Amino acid sequence: MSGSERMGKRILIVGPSWVGDMVMAQSLLKILKAQDPQCVIDVLGPAWSAPIIERMPEARRALTLRVGHGDLALRERWRFGRSLKGEYDQAIVLPRSLKSALVPWFAGVPVRVGFTGEQRYGILNQRRDLDKAVLDQTVKRFVSLGLPKGEAYPPREMPFPALRVDADNQARLREALDFAAVDLLDRPLVALMPGAEYGPAKQWPLAHFHATAQALVERGYGVLVLGGPKDVNAGQQVAGELPHTLNLCGKTALADAVDLLGMCEQVVSNDSGLMHVAAAVGVHVQGIYGSSSPRYTPPLTHNADIHWLALDCSPCFKRVCPLGHTDCLHQLSVTRVVKAIDTYRIEQSTILARETP
């Protein structure tokens, strides 16, 4: 068999349970492919994650284990693991829970790598200690599990996620969502993502989002408000009765959100899964942080402005502000964010003018 025909290592990645973390996991896939371009990578995740995994060129396929979030579901994991018997040479388990490591163990994968935690001795046969001082970001932790033991990956060389965008689906969405009806076809687009699945301590006030949308419309932008079914009411508060604005919360699939974000010039987003999706499709991110920290979960892109007040009480990493005021978000002004949007637009116009003969 020639080198070009050789099949590399067969690797199973057990992915995380949050959208943003799953996007960040693509950095690990990139590292594995850089080490062995012939390796074959499958990613196991919740049902919702398949559309994201399918947009990762490094992944051969998405595998879905249909169990409830947090459920042990021992019988289902055993059956699924046995169905994978003999298919993989190595498994890398990104979550630190016991249940997340069960499928590779039941599948008899010879090398099973993950961080020490929840009594996974034996279930994982290559355990890594988590040095939080060195691995101070989620993405660094993921990437480190694909490297030789003891090797910390330098952040300056960290490969960023890059999700594929489907141009055909973009064209379909423009028609299906009737962009023409609200005069969006000839306007630059900005997406606003007001949702915060983790809790209100990560959510910029909806009134701030609405004021931002109004300022954008006045500047000639079209506005897309994106989010899941839980964000429908929030999206309506943001969009209101503004012209050139579509509230798409709960109306699009996750794969559609990837393509809609790919149409945008910029996005304004809380520290959420969709923020990481936006970064991975290359749109300029205006990232808003409250109870969390951009030092721990930054958007993985050089194309971003970070808005974080870094108050004495931040980051607390709480779902609800323990002090009851959420000043870290309420005091982050609309003026600051809109000014950053304007500045980026001016910079891009200047670059385009220089490049145009």
Image (cartoon, rainbow, N blue to C red):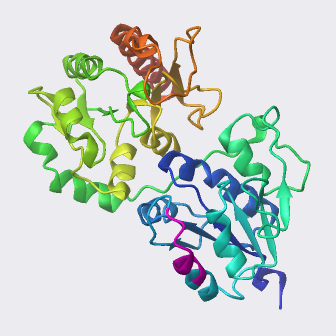
Q: Quadrant of residue 120?
A: bottom right
Please say whether residue 6 is one of the residues in the magenta stretch: no
Q: Main secondary structure of the magenta part?
A: helix
Q: Residue 200 appears at what percent x and percent y?
A: 38, 28
Per the rendered image, the range of residues in magenta is 71-78
In percent of width and height, residue 323 lies at: 46, 13
Q: Which image quarter holds the N terminus?
A: bottom right
Q: Is residue 214 left or right of residue 98?
A: left
Q: Along the horizontal axis of the image, is 242 left or right of 227?
A: left
Vertical placement of residue 112 versus 232, above or below: below
* Quadrant of the rendered image containing residue 321: top left
Residue beneath the point at 67% across and 61% down: 98
Position of residue 234 measured from the top left corner of the image (x, y, whole percent): 23, 33
In this rendering, the count of numbered labels is: 0
Query: Where residue 163 appears, x then y in whole percent?
Result: 51, 53
Looking at the picture, does residue 77 appear above or below residue 167? below
* Location of residue 92 with respect to 289 vertically, above or below: below
Residue that lies at the very extreme toward the bottom in this rendered image = 1
Residue depicted at 72% across the width and 55% down the height: 118
Q: Residue 279, can we see it?
A: yes
User: Residue at horizontal 75%, vertical 61%?
Assistant: 32
Q: Considering depth in this image, is 24 or 339 the residue closer to the camera?
A: 24
